[in-house]
């Protein structure tokens, strides 16, 4: 009898007395684009995957774009759900795109909605789109490379090359909540081109075709109190990534112009970055030591012995200049996207505590000493030039 | 229903109580007022040391007077014994109710937003009550298995979080003075409610090695707390303040290549640990009730306690239970240190009266 009761209780607990939603009644949102209209209302464009009913050409999930306009995001998603006749499921969403106007006005209310929605993972990627974000979702209908996965691939490759910051909701809010940090998001730009007639057709897999349009990372936006107030160029963004505090940069192209003429182009790897915080005259002082290894892939033919030292010295100068320019554009203006305040708090507490509120001003007067050590490494396929 | 208390092993007791204690950690909600994580990292071992001191009278009582706290309180007279059993029973009942309420709050806020709170409270109490009615041996055997599961999930989760760790979040915990450290130590110490269960259930383990059992419970619990606090601090940083359940968020961030996101695993763990906690406290409350009500069978005592806990759980506003409040520390001190001290003082006085 006791076992019977046990089984009954287990059945009650496991069989689900809570209503469930079948997959066919769910629309899986893959990407959300949020734009702010001139009248202050939101326009949301959703990239949605729905379970196939057999009508799609490849039998896979159907990808559609859905646009709604309204005063708040809760209402918009509810309206999208009603108009589609399916429950909008944000648990599969991988990307939030934000229009430039919204980013410049105030991004926080919209992003707080996604943070409060339990289905959305904190690691979801967030990016600002120059112009209208919804345009990118609609472009995804026409061309597969602008689907959520395609945009994420672009973003990840840009991060690996150092041209985009870690652009996640988690990192944005962590910096937004901190006393000193400046949230940073990648900025995307959709370049429209007329497609060649044969390339605009849907491909063999039944997905969207490819167009001549191009998506590129246009740098990173810096936020203060939810507003994007500055945009760093890709080179400035990479200048900050050299500090290695993000840890996402892998191989990045590094070209230097040689004095006799010609270019030395290499794939550079940040082997080690050490950033130490100290204090000098009551002000923070940061010493940055970078060890860079570069595999030179393109060189002029007529270089003599000692070319490696010459190229390495030029690369050192190029990296140092990039870092110094990035620091001048950020720390010099009171921005702290690299969270240098954490290092100051840890290693030079005297110049951080008591200055949390005006850390920006403190940072703008800080000193930076940048040392770069570059070494040319050989790839298996390159013959040594000095033999 | 089994009514005879059976023997359980020391490691089983430590494992089950440690797993139950982790539930309190899962319910932690950070706020701007709470101490920074760096301070909590230092406060955790300090609070464990404070709890060792708090439990010292209990260990001494077991060595010099007798093994069973309730039986020893009986030597101080029937009113005292009744009051002690009532206080211990009420504490266990409220802990079971708090566990139920918080479990229901988690489920209705993070998993099933549209479900009713009372549904989860009823199911958890029914399942926990049934498990408690099977007796200590079954409960602690299940607790040991859950502890092993907990350990596996924690290792997996922390390994998945390694790429996300940012050690530069750490700084000197005394940078903002001693006051946050003192406040955090009091909060952490107050969360060791399982010391009351230890006091009630140590007699089931037989004599000897009490010190090791206490050290095991406090040490394992402190280790879990340290690991989770460290991971929350270095992975989520200031973002944790925006989340209702930071450890659930941590599980969402942790991604293992094969398993994907680990929040589902975390929900399973939440449910398992919640079940264990409610079962243990219902059992503890039933033990006290049987002291008060004489020959009441264990199953009936558990049923009465489950009903009481259910009523209390539904009465807790919003289902939120502050396990680290100063009142909780006072109750803990009274039950874990106060009662054994009274027994020890009484014994000393009677020895003096009887003379050499």
Image (cartoon, coloured by chain):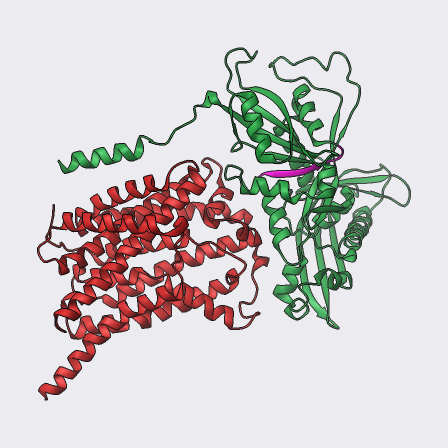
Horizontal side of B266 relative to B32 (left or right) equals: left
What is the drawing colour of chain B? red
User: In the rendered view, does A335 fall on the left or right side of A203?
Assistant: right
Residue B46 picture location, percent across and down = 41, 69
| Residue A128 covered by magenta stretch | yes
- Look at 68% across and 34% down and name the residue there: A41
> Is any atom of residue B15 visible in this view?
no
- Residue beneath the point at 11% across and 45% down: B1
Question: Chain A takes which shade in the image?
Answer: green
Residue A36 horizontal/vertical position (percent)? 70, 35
Q: Against A164, is A331 above or below?
A: below
| Image quadrant where one finds the C terminus of chain A | top right
Front one among B262 and A92: A92
Image position, residue A349 (x, y; %): 64, 68
Residue B226 locus on image (x, y percent): 44, 59
Locate the N terminus of chain A by quadrant. Answer: top left
Left or right of residue A239: residue B234: left
- Compared with B81, A242 (above or below) is above
Between A129 and B150, the one lying in front of the other is A129
Q: Residue visible at 51% across and 72% down?
A: B179
User: Predominant secondary structure in magenta?
Assistant: strand
| Highlighted magenta segment, given as a residue range | A124-131
Res. A161 in view: yes
From the viewer's side, name the closer residue of A348 and A223.
A223
């Amino acid at each position: 009898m006791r076992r019977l009761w046990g089984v009954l209780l287990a059945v009650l607990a496991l069989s689900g007395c809570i209503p469930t939603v079948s997959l066919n009644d769910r629309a899986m949102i893959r990407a959300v684009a949020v734009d702010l209209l001139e009248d202050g209302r939101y326009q949301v464009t959703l990239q949605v995957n729905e379970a196939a009913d057999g009508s799609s050409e490849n039998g896979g999930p159907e990808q559609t774009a859905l646009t709604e306009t309204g005063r708040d995001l809760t209402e918009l998603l509810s309206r999208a759900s009603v108009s589609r006749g399916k429950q909008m499921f944000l648990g599969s969403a991988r990307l939030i795109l934000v229009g430039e106007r919204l980013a410049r006005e105030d991004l926080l209310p919209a992003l707080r909605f996604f943070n409060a929605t339990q289905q959305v993972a904190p690691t979801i990627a967030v990016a600002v789109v120059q112009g209208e974000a919804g345009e990118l979702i609609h472009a995804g209908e026409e061309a597969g490379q602008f689907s959520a996965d395609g945009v994420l691939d672009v973003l990840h490759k840009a991060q690996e090359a150092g041209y985009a910051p870690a652009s996640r909701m988690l990192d944005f809010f962590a910096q937004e909540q901190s006393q000193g940090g400046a949230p940073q998001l990648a900025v995307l730009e959709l370049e429209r081109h007329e497609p060649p007639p044969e390339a605009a057709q849907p491909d063999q897999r039944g997905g969207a075709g490819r167009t001549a349009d191009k998506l590129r990372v246009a740098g990173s936006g810096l936020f203060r109190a939810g507003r994007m107030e500055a945009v760093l160029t890709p080179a400035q963004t990479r200048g900050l990534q050299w500090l290695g505090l993000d840890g996402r940069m892998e191989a990045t192209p590094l070209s230097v112009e040689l004095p006799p003429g010609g270019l030395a182009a290499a794939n550079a790897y940040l082997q080690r970055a050490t950033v130490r915080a100290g204090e000098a005259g009551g002000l923070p002082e940061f010493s940055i030591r970078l060890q860079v290894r570069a595999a030179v892939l393109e060189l002029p033919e007529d270089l003599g012995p000692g070319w490696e030292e010459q190229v390495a010295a030029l690369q050192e100068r190029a990296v140092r200049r990039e870092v110094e320019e990035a620091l001048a554009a950020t720390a010099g203006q009171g921005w702290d996207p690299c969270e240098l305040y954490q290092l100051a708090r840890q290693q030079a507490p005297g110049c951080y505590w008591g200055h949390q509120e005006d850390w920006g001003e403190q940072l703008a007067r800080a000193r930076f000493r940048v040392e770069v050590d570059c070494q040319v490494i050989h790839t298996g396929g390159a013959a040594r030039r000095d033999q | 229903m089994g009514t005879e208390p059976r023997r359980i092993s020391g490691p089983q007791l430590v494992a089950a109580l440690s797993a139950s204690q982790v539930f309190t950690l899962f319910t932690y909600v950070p706020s701007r007022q709470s101490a920074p994580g760096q301070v909590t990292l230092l406060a955790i071992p300090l609070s464990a040391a404070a709890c060792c001191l708090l439990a010292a009278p209990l260990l001494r009582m077991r060595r010099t007077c007798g093994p069973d706290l309730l039986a020893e309180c009986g030597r101080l007279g029937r009113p005292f014994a009744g009051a002690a059993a009532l206080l211990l029973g009420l504490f266990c009942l409220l802990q079971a109710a708090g566990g139920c309420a918080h479990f229901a709050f988690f489920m209705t806020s993070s998993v099933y937003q549209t479900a009713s709170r009372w549904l989860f409270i009823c199911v958890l109490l029914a399942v926990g009550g049934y498990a408690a009615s099977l007796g200590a041996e079954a409960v602690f055997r299940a607790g040991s298995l859950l502890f092993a599961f907990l350990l596996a999930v924690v290792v997996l989760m922390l390994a998945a979080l390694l790429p996300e760790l940012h050690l530069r979040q750490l700084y000197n915990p005394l940078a903002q003075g001693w006051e946050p450290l003192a406040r955090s130590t009091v909060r952490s110490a107050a969360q060791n409610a399982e010391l009351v269960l230890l006091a009630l259930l140590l007699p089931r383990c037989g004599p000897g090695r009490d010190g090791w059992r206490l050290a095991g419970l406090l040490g394992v619990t402190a280790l879990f707390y340290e690991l989770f606090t460290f991971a929350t601090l270095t992975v989520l940083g200031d973002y944790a303040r925006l989340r209702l359940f930071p450890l659930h968020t941590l599980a969402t961030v942790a991604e293992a290549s094969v398993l994907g996101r680990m929040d589902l695993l975390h929900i399973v763990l939440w449910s398992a640990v919640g079940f264990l906690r409610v079962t243990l406290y219902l059992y503890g409350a039933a033990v006290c009730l049987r002291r008060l009500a004489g020959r009441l069978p264990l199953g009936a005592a558990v049923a009465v306690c489950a009903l009481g806990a259910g009523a209390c759980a539904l009465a807790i506003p919003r289902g939120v239970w502050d396990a680290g409040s100063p009142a909780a520390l006072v109750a803990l001190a009274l039950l874990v240190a106060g009662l054994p001290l009274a027994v020890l003082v009484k014994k000393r006085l009677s020895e003096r009266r009887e003379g050499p």
